[in-house]
Image (cartoon, rainbow, N blue to C red):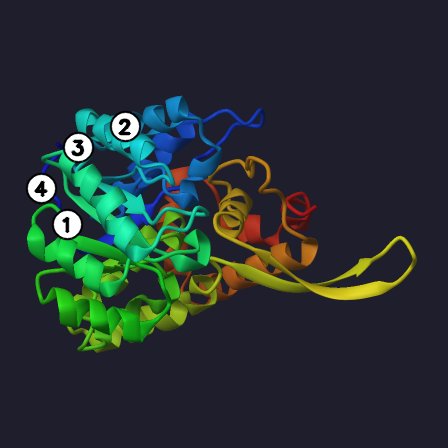
Amino acid sequence: MSGTFRPHGLWTALVTPFSTDLQVDHDAFRRLIEFQIEEGVDGVLPCGTTGESPTLSWQEHDAVVEAGVRVVEGRVGVLAGTGSNNTQEAIRASKQAKDAGATAVLLVDCYYNGPSSLELRTEYYERILEAVPDVPIVPYVIPGRSGCALSAADLAILHLNDPKRVPAVKQATGDLERMRLDRKLAGPALSILSGDDEMTLSMMRDEEIRASGVISVLSNIVPGAIAQLVRAESADDAEETDRLSAALAPLLGLVTCNVTAVRTLPNGQSVEVTDKFRNPVPVKTMMAGLGMISSAKRAPLGRMSSTAVAQCRKALRAVHSADPGIFGPLEDAFDVRIDQRLGDDGIWSALAR
């Protein structure tokens, strides 16, 4: 295991860069991790949903985790995504991540087959804890994607039975009352990590939640600024926290991008719909627009509409206008000029469908 797991601060849920032929781009992945470390993250998460883990083969999944550990070289933590809707697959992946040197593993609630919370605890989390000793696990509660949820009571049982093995939860329910119950039942030792960029400050400031940090999507782009935001809040520096929060606000709401569109049916009828482009489509689009990685994503994920791309570009422009220094480290790390990239219509039109 690579170091002691310290579930606080900023952990970046890494995208998985692909080449134009949709193979994992390990050079781009290495460059992204180095950027994260240079900008002061506390850890990185390879092979989460942001890393398009559902479309990685298990061989690719293992290789990405191994590459992440190898590049990090113990400088920060590595929280490997190893969850599945198949307990045996999760056990195998968790063993592999542990052997590779991951600091801890992130286990998402079992998507689609919809176990009860009792089954999640006894037939998933507890089995993995028994089968893969000596590595901490972090339950990931995200009912909007998984269609089920580990309850606050069952989370508390896991944590209180073995606080060192279950030291934290990634909370992405969007439900502050549920998070308050997590804290009430599990007690003060459980680390609650935000799984929603735009809710991080609310979760940290709520005295009944007291979140200790965030597993962030948008820190792929601005790790330094989000790390500073989390540390300023932890240090009760309200002035700096509010300054950074205001500057980053246009970006932090774009983990998912919702836009209204019109579909024309074969019979000529027009219907208004909402297109919901979910993580990692917006963040990968913005990273490609800024010159960090290619825009390649594996189907069924694809390009956003021109309206959605324009919304992402507008948000980036607003952040850059509010504080040009926020993107400064990105310019140096990726040898790009933000003004030039944001002003080039051709770059952004090429990213739209």
Q: CA distance from mark 4 to mark 3?
A: 20 Å
Give the residue drawn at x 21%, y 38%.
128
Q: Nearer the viewer, residue 260 or 164?
A: 164
Question: On the image, numbered disc 4 is attached to which residue?
Answer: 4
Which residue is under mark 3? 131
Q: Amino acid at mark 1?
A: Val
Outermost residue toward the right in this view: 267
Q: Are marks 4 and 3 in contact (CB under 8 Å)?
A: no
Distance of mark 2 from mark 3, alpha carbons? 9 Å
Q: Is residue 71 visible?
A: no
Q: Residue at x 30, y 26 (%)?
A: 67
Q: Residues within 10 Å of mark 4 (few under 14, many from 20)?
A: few
Q: Is residue 69 above or below residue 179?
A: above
Q: Mark 2 or mark 4, which is nearer the start of the sequence?
A: 4
Q: Residue at (17%, 77%) from the top-left corner?
A: 207
Which sits earlier in the primary sequence, circle 1 or circle 4? 4
| Whether residue 233 is situated above or below residue 40 in the rendered picture | below
Q: Nearer the viewer, residue 256 or 27?
A: 256
Q: In the displayed structure, does residue 246 sit left or right of residue 158?
A: right
Q: Are marks 4 and 2 in contact (CB under 8 Å)?
A: no
Q: Earlier in the sequence, mark 4 or mark 3?
A: 4
The residue carrying pointer 2 sits among few (fewer than 14), some (14 to 19) or many (20 or more) residues within 10 Å by Cα, namely: some
Q: Which residue is mark 1?
A: 166
The answer to whether residue 241 is visible is: yes
Q: Tag 3, which secondary structure?
A: helix
Q: Amino acid at mark 2?
A: Arg
The x, y position of residue 338, in whole percent, is 49, 50
Task: Quickly name the residue at label 2.
Answer: 92
Q: Secondary structure at mark 1?
A: loop
The amino acid sitting under disc 4 is Thr
